[in-house]
Amino acid sequence: MSQSVKYNAVVTVLGKDRVGIIAGVTAVLAKMNINISDISQTILKDMFTMIMLVDTIKSTCDFETIREELRVLGEEMNLEIRIQHKDIFNAMQRI
Amino acid sequence: MFENFEILETINMFRNQHLDVRTITMGINLLDCADESAETACRKIYDKITKQAEHLVDVADQISSEFGVPIIHKRISVTPISLVAGASDVDDYLCFAKALDNASKTVGVNFVGGFSALVQKGFTDSDFKLLNSIPQALAETDQVCASINLASTKSGINMDAVALMGKIIKECAELTKDTEAYGCAKLVVFANAPDDNPFMAGAFTGVGEPECAINVGVSGPGVILAALKEVPGQSMDIVAETIKRTAFKVTRVGQLVAEQAAERLNVPFGTIDLSLAPTPVVGDSIARILEEIGVDTCGAWGTTAALAMLNDAVKKGGTMASSHVGGLSGAFIPVSEDEGMIAAVESGALNLEKLEAMTSVCSVGIDMVAIPGDTPTSTISAIIADEMAIGVFNNKTTAVRIIPVPGKVAGDKVIYGGLWGEAPIMEINPHCSQRLIERGGRIPAPIHSMRN
């Protein structure tokens, strides 16, 4: 991942692996005009884990709406989907 | 850019380890609300709080949503009411408590602290009025918390006030006996009370504070416990270092939230309180941390040493993470609010005497401890006197929030629910301290108070 990746928030998806997780999440993000700058995924102890760095600046929705849309999608797909401003990770992981 | 494990570590702290910001507390100066007419003063108080804190809850919810950080409480602390109400033409300060209660409910916070008086050296007329109004004020309001500073290292211990508070606590218990003396849970007495404490029941805004400020209390026992589970059997050096590193991360969350809240509310950032505050939820307990460090049950010999190290390491890690640290800052050991403490009392491992020893090395003190309803008033005062002495002579903050539950005896249990938890009734040393309390007067300030 290069230093120039532009993002202001981190989307994390946790749950049981199944067909269509990435398709489902990216479709919802695209609908709200949210650009995905980076995606990575791993399987940790049978747990599907996807981390996306996203840019919500040009989104048509405010943060609360985005969060709610992702939460609803998570419920439908039986996944835990979160979006958090990147500063929380900066605060905790960087001095 | 972050590594995946860093992102997952942060997520996990919120998801599995109960990391949260315990409270955003807005401190509001009410000195300018003083008025000869109590009615006018109460109206000014209501107006000022509802204006100043109008957006507090919305902003806290917004921050919580954006950063994915649970913010448990939104609260208000005000200038000690004895200082504000003194100018008014009434002897009963119940109306002031009701004004605070109404304002608190209007802005949607869950508690307002500052039905308070600072009497460490003596009483003003207004202080007396406030103290005497406490039982009714706490019985007839829902969200008002009262705190009294009875002692300080600079002034010594006001033993007349210690004696009086024993009576007031009993009255408070009697007036709220239908709710297991819940009124006493909203009343705390202090030695060396901090001016910027965001935690209830002891929050008030001291006279050196600005017009308005945001003070934030962090939490995170679950995160510390999880980190310590990764270093079983390692030396105390490693344990202390692990706690420091974890406390740093926990405090950075509080600092971020405090900065954001201050900016969005256009109010100065005051301090971060570094306290580890437990909840009754399993996995969010201070006692379980002490047990992870190595005592089989909290209260066993070694508990005080483990707690001292924990408290110190939390401060060391947290101090670097925050631009301004204040409040109580240390590990809280409220019995009813900590699942491990409750279990320790019920197993017989933790008694009140050991709890007192523990308070000499951590913050707060004898907190949320339920005792038999027939405990003599002088014994309650003597418990307070001992706790005040620990604070005054060790140059630290200590407090007592004790609940003599009418009709209950040692071994019974009362359930308050929610974050207040459930309190096993603890056994009290039956020997009498009445003559000590009847002496009254003032215990002089210790020699080390003279540092000039």
Image (cartoon, coloured by chain):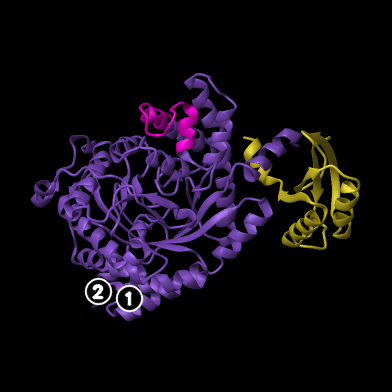
Chain colours: A yellow, B purple
Span of residues in magenta: B287-309
Relative to residue B130, is residue A86 depicted above or below? above
Q: Is residue B196 above or below residue B146?
A: above
Query: Does any portion of residue A81 appear in the rendered image?
Result: yes
Amino acid type at image mark 1: Cys
The residue that mark 1 highlights is B95
Main secondary structure type of the part rendered in magenta = helix
- Which quadrant of the rendered structure holds the N terminus of chain B? top right
Image spot of residue B15 (x, y percent):
65, 45
In this picture, residue A46 sits left or right of residue B119: right
Q: Marks 1 and 2, how far apart in space?
A: 7 Å
* Quarter residue B448 falls in: top left
- State the residue position of label 2: B92
- Percent coordinates x, y for residue B106 in the rendering: 50, 73
Q: Position of residue A28 (x, y in %)?
A: 86, 57
Q: Residues within 10 Å of mark 2 (few under 14, many from 20)?
A: some
Tag 2: residue type? Asp
- Of A77 and B5, nearer the camera is A77
Q: Nearer the viewer, residue B450 or B371?
A: B371
- Tags 1 and 2 touching, CB below 8 Å: yes
Would residue B228 be counted in the magenta stretch? Answer: no
* Residue B308 position by quadrant: top left
